[in-house]
Image: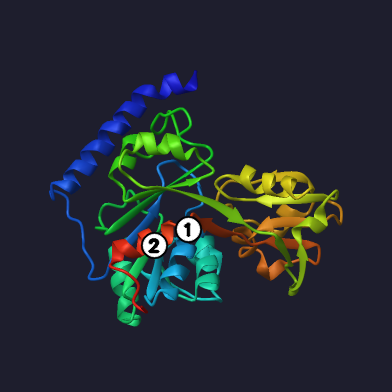
Amino acid sequence: MLAWLLWPASLAFRAAVFLRRALYRLRLLPSARVDVPVIVVGNLVVGGSGKTPLALWIAVHLLRAGWSPGIVSRGYGAAIDAPREVTLTSEASEVGDEPILLARRSGCPVWVGPDRARVIHALREKHPDVDVVVLDDGLQHYRLRRDVEIAVVDARGFGNGQLLPAGPLREPVARLRTVGAVIAHGADKARLAALAPGVPVFGMRLEGETLHRMTDARDRRPLKALAGRAVHAVAAIGNPNRFFLHLVRAGAKPRLHPFPDHHPLRAEDLDFGDILPVVMTEKDAVKLRGVAQPNWWVLPVQAAPDHGFGPWLLQQLGGAKNR
């Protein structure tokens, strides 16, 4: 019923999206091109779909192929008005939670800011060896021209198929026909191939089977050690159910504590009045590292795309540099 009430507003949003994209395509609105290839990893729906793990995988894959990637992000959840470098000591309140995760895991320079073109220029001034940029989110950031567009679709699909505010879509589903590749993260590959004829569709899953104790990262346990045990499961991500189901499949009995995406978690949010293990995502752990408790555990995950995706990506860039 609510979707029907919001349908007129959704139509107006659709018209605005169409007009905005058309103005950029006709060069009536300015868009900047930088002097290195730009790979955009994004999605059509509001909320997370696995973009950040995929962006991390891409950066590491390019490093191994002889490229020197940099990573750029908006830095959601932080008040940023100018390009800023992310370091291992950065706070999530200053640069966002996902950029810290990317900086820790990638070994690449990571910068944040609202104007991605300005951020890339600042990044390359300090790191002139960077020869390709991976943009974590930004499919709709048309102010920056891009060389490769990758759209991630997870198991939620497209909801009711309506654009904001009547539905979850930022752009119409037809936008998939214009991207370079579609990544099916638990979504139906055959359906996506039908929606985007001629666009390659690759599958992807998230893997994570080892827990780290937050107060001592050297203390590691297999996720299966939680089988049959009650635990508190905390997730402030776009799709917390994906994390919760991962724990259930490992045999754990989670008590669910979902929070809004990018929620600024505090120690009191995780005070559940007992000493049961508290398991959280790595994205959430970066916000709590200064107040970690011995019964808090982190489950890092890694993207695992289909084997054909890596060669396809390198082909878009002209191949590996270490061949």
Q: Is residue 161 left or right of residue 154?
A: left
Residue 56 appears at what percent x and percent y? 48, 64
Q: Which residue matches tag 2?
A: 311
**Residues at badges 1 and 2 in contact (C-beta under 8 Å)?**
yes
| Residue 82 visible in the displayed image | no
Report the residue at 69% width, 51% height from top: 234
Q: Secondary structure at mark 1?
A: loop
Q: Which residue type does callout 2 highlight?
A: Pro
Image position of 290 with respect to 181: above or below: below
The Cα atoms of the two marked residues, 1 and 2, are separated by 8 Å
Q: Is residue 286 left or right of residue 85?
A: right
Q: Is residue 221 left or right of residue 122?
A: right
Report the residue at 72% width, 68% height from top: 214
Quarter of the image that includes the C terminus? bottom left
Report the residue at 45% width, 34% height from top: 158
Q: Which residue type does callout 1 highlight?
A: His
Q: Secondary structure at mark 2?
A: helix
Between 61 and 118, the one lying in front of the other is 61
Residue 172 appears at what percent x and percent y? 34, 35
Between 235 and 323, the one lying in front of the other is 323
Residue 76 appears at what percent x and percent y? 47, 56
Image position of 231 with respect to 169: above or below: below
Q: Which mark is residue 307?
A: 1
Q: Residues within 10 Å of mark 1 (few under 14, many from 20)?
A: few
Q: Residues within 10 Å of mark 2 (few under 14, many from 20)?
A: few
- Give the quadrant of residue 19: top left
- Give the quadrant of residue 91: bottom right
Between 270 and 103, the one lying in front of the other is 103
| Residue 40 visible in the displayed image | yes
